[in-house]
Every structure is written in C-alpha cells, then in structure tokens.
Image (cartoon, rainbow, N blue to C red):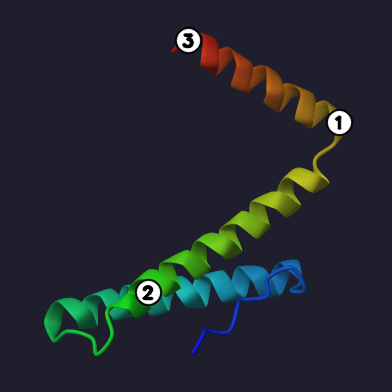
Amino acid sequence: MAKEKLDVVSLSDDDLQSQLASMENEYQQMKFDHAVKGLGNPMELRELRRNIARVRTEGRRRELAAMSEGDLDMRSKLRERRRRQK
C-alpha cells in the first residue's frame, strides 16, 4: 500500500508555487488539528512535510538552472568565503 509519489518535475513554475502554498496551509491546519484533537494517522504530517521539501527542492533546482554563469560564479565565491569564515 505505497503512497503515490509526488511528481513535481512535470509541473510549471506557477503550479509549483501554488501547490507549495496549498501544502503549507494544509500542513499548518493538520498541525493544529493534531495538537487539539489528534490525527487518525500522525505519520501523514511527516509525509506532507517531506512533500513540501520535495517541492522546495525542485523550485531551488530550477532557480539554480536559470541562473547565468556570472551569478553562479558569484554564488560560488560567496560560499567559499563563508566556508573560510567558519
């Protein structure tokens, strides 16, 4: 009885953002419901949280893919500078 895997790669950018917003709202509502009366299956919270992470990861992957070469170079320089400061 495996859950249906979330297919975020095939979604457009607008659909991805709208789905992220709706999933975050649903997560907040589920957290509230769980705190007040409990959920039938609290593992749904974990699954929803992981789906939110999948959507955010895909959004960030697309954001990095859309960056220009100069932006990516600047990002690498910033990351290297932060590593040296630690």
Q: Earlier in the sequence, mark 3 or mark 1?
A: 1
> Residue at 52% across / 84% down in the picture?
3
Quick one: which residue is furthest to the left in this view? 36
Q: Position of residue 73 (x, y in %)?
A: 78, 23
With respect to residue 68, does 45 lie above or below?
below
Q: CA distance from mark 2 to mark 3?
A: 36 Å
Please tell me whether mark 3 sits on a helix, a strand or a loop.
helix
Asked if residue 5 lies left or right of residue 43, the reply is right
Which residue is labeled 3 in the image? 85
> Residue at 22% across / 83% down in the picture?
33
> Residue at 13% across / 87% down in the picture?
37
> Residue at 42% across / 67% down in the picture?
49
Q: Position of residue 86 (x, y in %)?
A: 44, 13
User: Mark 3: which amino acid?
Assistant: Gln
Which of 36 and 7 lies nearest the eye of the viewer? 7
Quarter where residue 10 is shown: bottom right
Disc assigned to residue 69: 1
Q: CA distance from mark 1 to mark 2?
A: 37 Å
